[in-house]
Amino acid sequence: MNILVFDIHITGHHSEYISHFVDYLVTNASKDNYYFIVHPSFCEKFPEIVAAAHKVDYIHIVPIAQDAFLTMDSVNRIKRSINYFKLMNFYSIQYKVDLCYLLHMNVFQIALGLYKVPYKIRGILFMQFTNMKISSVKDYYYYLRRYFPMLLCIRNQKLDSVFLLNDSDSAVLLNDKFKKEAVFKYLPDPVPFVVSEKDFDLRTFYGIDKERKIFLHFGSLSERKGTLDILDSVYFLQENQKTTTIVLAGKATDAFDAVLSEKISKIRKVTDVQVVWDNSFISNERVVALFNQCDAVLIPYKNAEASSGVLGHAIHSGKKVIGPSNGLIGKLIKNNDLGVCIDSINPEKIASALFSKFLDEKSAINSAYLEEHKPANFIKTLLCT
């Protein structure tokens, strides 16, 4: 059988999921051929994944052309969905695939409702509408923007499985709602088991005094991740400014990069809060060290409907988080006693949560959670084995 795995983005979980897939297939011999359709710079950025894939002859890494990548996105959601679908379908037909995995399915939903395909489709759905709280006309509008694409998508007769990260409740609800026996499936968001970088000391490396508490904000930086609210929260800290360090560890778009740089520069001039921004590529081993050595993790995401890989890292390191009270993230934090929930994501609320006594309590590492969320179990679930 020929199987396509499609994900042409390169940051955060995109490369992590492909790495988990390749690692599993290398250590578990397969009779099937796997074609990974990836970002133009994937081989350059992740040579270790490519080297692992080359150990066997049934894994093929296929970067798309840069020109093709640049034509994918469009302001028009329907056109964007069709663009992604046509590129995926081109490779699916070329390699005569029997099954296609969409590692980020959301953008494909509209097109999947409009086009027929001769192969089965399985995909990971992020930010499903089931976890949205509707309290205004604006909320309802965004609910419909999530609901109608799925209503279209579910019409495709070749849709075999839709995986929902960390959300068994929504899997049951959606199967019932759309009269499907088991199309919607719970998928454990993988927590990588990586050894911390040896001899790395967070405080020494970034020049952080021992009396300061370190709050880590990790991953791609953006307005919807609450990055700006975190920075603006420092003005509400008052007597705690001299004992606060915020470490931003992640990349930002060029436009957002300029906004962050300006905000950080101002904070350094007018407050005693230390802000560190490491926007370089951070190895997996160093990521583990950052989580192990910080005091708490900041995930004040404004779109809380999806799961968070950062939450998994915090659980693995036994660190409390500050995050939203709503959505799937809020449910996970509350149900597992993982940190402080904020009802409204804004600078003042974040500031009041930073020095909550609850954050001083180290989380007990949840062994059962980590066992269930091993990358191998993530892949086994996707493969329906």
Image: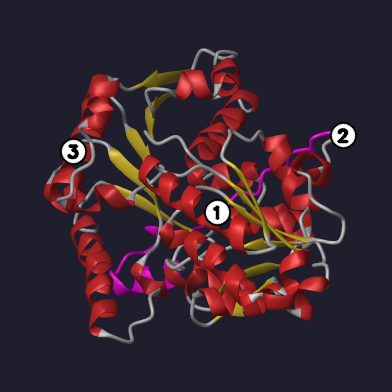
Q: Is residue 55 left or right of residue 167?
A: right
Crowding around mark 1 (Cα neighbors within 10 Å: few <14, some 14 to 19, many 20+) is: some
Report, in whole angstroms, how far the alpha carbon at label 3 lies from the one at label 2.
Answer: 46 Å
Q: Secondary structure at mark 3?
A: helix
At horizontal 51% and vertical 35% (from top left) the residue drawn is 15
Instruction: Residue 255: give x, y in percent of width and height.
Output: 36, 45
Residue 83 numbered tag: 3
The range drawn in magenta is: 171-198
Quarter of the rendering containing residue 214: bottom right
Q: Is residue 213 magenta?
A: no
Q: Earlier in the sequence, mark 3 or mark 1?
A: 3
Q: Comparing marks 3 and 1, which lies closer to the viewer? A: 1
Q: Comparing marks 1 and 2, which lies closer to the viewer? A: 1
Q: Are marks 1 and 2 in contact (CB under 8 Å)?
A: no
Q: Earlier in the sequence, mark 3 or mark 2?
A: 3
Q: Indicate whether 340 appears above or below 262.
A: below
Residue 221 in sight in this render = no
Q: Is residue 47 left or right of residue 206?
A: left
Q: Which residue is mark 2?
A: 199
At horizontal 25% and vertical 78% (from top left) the residue drawn is 138
Q: Is residue 162 left or right of residue 369?
A: left
Q: Secondary structure at mark 2?
A: loop
Instruction: Residue 170: give x, y in percent of width and height.
Output: 43, 70
Q: Which residue is mark 1?
A: 264
Crowding around mark 2 (Cα neighbors within 10 Å: few <14, some 14 to 19, many 20+) is: few
Quarter of the rendering containing residue 271: bottom right
Quarter of the rendering containing residue 359: bottom right
Instruction: Residue 363: give x, y in percent of width and height.
Output: 80, 67
At horizontal 52% and vertical 39% (from top left) the residue drawn is 17
Instruction: Check disc 2 and give the amino acid type.
Output: Asp
